[in-house]
Image: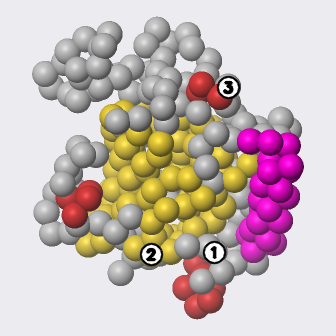
C-alpha cells in the first residue's frame, strides 16, 4: 500500500473511531435497538439442537447468516498501529436454549502458532462485551473505571490435529489452544478471571482462520456478560507475522449482537 492510500485509510478510521468513542459515551443496548447507532447488527440465530463445535460443520455455512465487519487501525493509545494487515472479519452467531456460539473468520496466509510456548508474535483474536448491558456503553478502549468489560481472547499455543508437528490426541481436535476469560476497566487493567467459563476452538484451513467461542447464555458470575438480551460487542484481531501484539491490532468498535 502506498503512503497516500495508507494515510487516507488511517484518516478514515480515525474519524470512525472518534465517532465510536462519542457513541460509547452515551449509548446503551436499548438505544442501539432504537436507532442502530452502534454499527452493523449481527443476528444471533436460534437453533434447536447442539451448537456444532467444528468451525467447518455445514451448519455454519448453511444455517447462519455471515456478516462482514471491517477492521481498522488502533490509533487511540501507544503504540498506535496505523496499518493492521487483517482488514475484515466475518462474524456468525447462534444460540440454543442454554448456550451461545460466536464464530470469527478471517483471511490469513500464515499460521502463526506457539508450539513451544516461546513465540511472542502469534495470531490472536478477541471479542469484548460490557459487563452491564443496561449501563451506558463503556469506552472501546477496554472499558473504563466503573464500567468493566468482559473479554474473550484466543491464541493458538498449539494446533489442530493433523497439522504438522501436532501430537495426535484422539479425544480432541486440538493439542493445545487457549481461550481466556478476562475483565478490564481500561488499558493496563486486563485481569484473568478465577473461573474460566468460555470454551472454543480455532482451525486454520485454506489460508483462513475459523474460530468459535462458546459459553452458556447466563451464569452466576458477576464479572461475565449475560446474554439475556441483545448486547454490544467489539472485535480485535492480531496477525503474528505482521508483528502485532497488545495494542497493535485491527479493531472494530461496538457492534450489536442482536438476540431474538
Which is nearer the N-term, disc 2 or disc 3? 3
> Disc 2 and disc 3: Cα gap in Å?
34 Å
Q: Which mark is residue 258?
A: 2
Examine the rendered structure and indicate whether residue 212 appears above or below residue 132.
above
Q: Which mark is residue 243?
A: 3
Left/right placement of residue 63 relative to residue 202 reads left
Q: How many other residues sit within 10 Å of disc 2, few (<14), some (14-19) or many (≥20)?
A: many
On the rendered image, what quadrant is the C terminus found in?
bottom left
Which is nearer the N-term, disc 3 or disc 1? 1
Residue 80 shows in the view = yes
- Indicate which label's residue lies in the foreground, 2 or 3: 3
Left/right placement of residue 255 relative to residue 180 reads right
Which is nearer the eye, 209 or 179?
209
Q: Is residue 28 magenta?
A: no
> Disc 2 and disc 1: Cα gap in Å?
11 Å
| Residue wearing tag 1 | 38
* Residue 63 drawn at (x, y percent): 23, 66
Name the residue located 26 percent from the left edge and 72 percent from the top edge. 46
Examine the rendered structure and indicate whether residue 53 appears above or below residue 139.
above
Query: Quadrant location of residue 95?
Result: bottom left
Q: Residue furthest bottom?
A: 34
Name the residue located 80 percent from the left edge and 51 percent from the top edge. 5
Left/right placement of residue 159 relative to residue 254 reads left
- Span shown in magenta: 1-24
Left/right placement of residue 194 relative to residue 238 reads left
Secondary structure beneath disc 3? loop
* Residue 104 drawn at (x, y percent): 43, 50
Q: Is residue 21 magenta?
A: yes
Q: Main secondary structure of the magenta part?
A: helix
Q: Are marks 2 and 3 in contact (CB under 8 Å)?
A: no
Which is nearer the N-term, disc 2 or disc 1? 1
Amino acid at each position: 500500500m502506498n503512503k497516500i492510500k495508507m494515510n487516507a485509510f488511517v484518516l478514515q478510521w480515525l474519524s470512525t473511531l472518534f465517532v465510536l468513542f462519542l457513541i460509547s459515551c452515551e449509548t446503551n443496548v436499548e438505544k442501539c435497538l432504537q436507532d442502530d447507532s452502534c454499527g452493523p447488527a449481527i443476528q444471533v440465530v436460534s437453533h434447536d439442537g447442539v451448537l456444532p463445535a467444528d468451525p467447518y460443520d455445514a451448519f455454519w455455512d448453511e444455517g447462519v447468516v455471515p456478516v462482514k465487519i471491517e477492521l481498522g487501525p488502533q490509533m487511540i493509545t501507544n503504540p498506535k498501529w496505523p496499518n493492521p494487515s487483517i482488514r475484515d472479519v466475518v462474524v456468525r452467531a447462534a444460540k440454543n436454549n442454554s448456550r451461545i456460539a460466536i464464530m470469527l473468520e478471517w483471511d490469513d496466509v500464515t499460521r502463526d502458532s506457539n508450539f513451544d510456548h516461546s513465540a511472542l508474535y502469534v495470531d490472536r483474536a478477541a471479542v469484548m462485551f460490557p459487563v452491564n448491558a443496561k449501563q451506558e456503553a463503556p469506552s472501546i478502549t477496554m472499558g473504563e473505571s466503573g464500567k468493566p468489560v468482559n473479554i474473550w481472547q484466543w491464541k493458538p499455543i498449539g494446533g489442530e490435529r493433523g497439522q504438522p508437528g501436532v501430537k495426535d490426541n484422539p479425544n480432541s481436535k486440538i493439542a493445545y489452544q487457549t481461550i481466556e476469560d478476562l475483565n478490564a476497566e481500561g488499558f493496563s487493567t486486563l485481569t484473568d478471571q478465577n473461573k474460566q467459563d468460555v470454551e472454543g476452538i480455532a482451525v486454520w484451513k485454506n489460508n483462513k482462520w475459523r474460530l468459535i467461542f462458546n459459553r452458556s447464555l447466563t451464569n452466576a458470575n458477576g464479572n461475565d456478560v449475560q446474554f439475556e438480551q441483545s448486547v454490544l460487542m467489539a472485535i480485535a484481531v492480531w496477525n503474528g507475522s505482521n508483528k502485532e501484539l497488545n495494542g497493535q491490532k485491527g479493531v472494530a468498535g461496538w457492534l450489536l449482537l442482536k438476540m431474538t
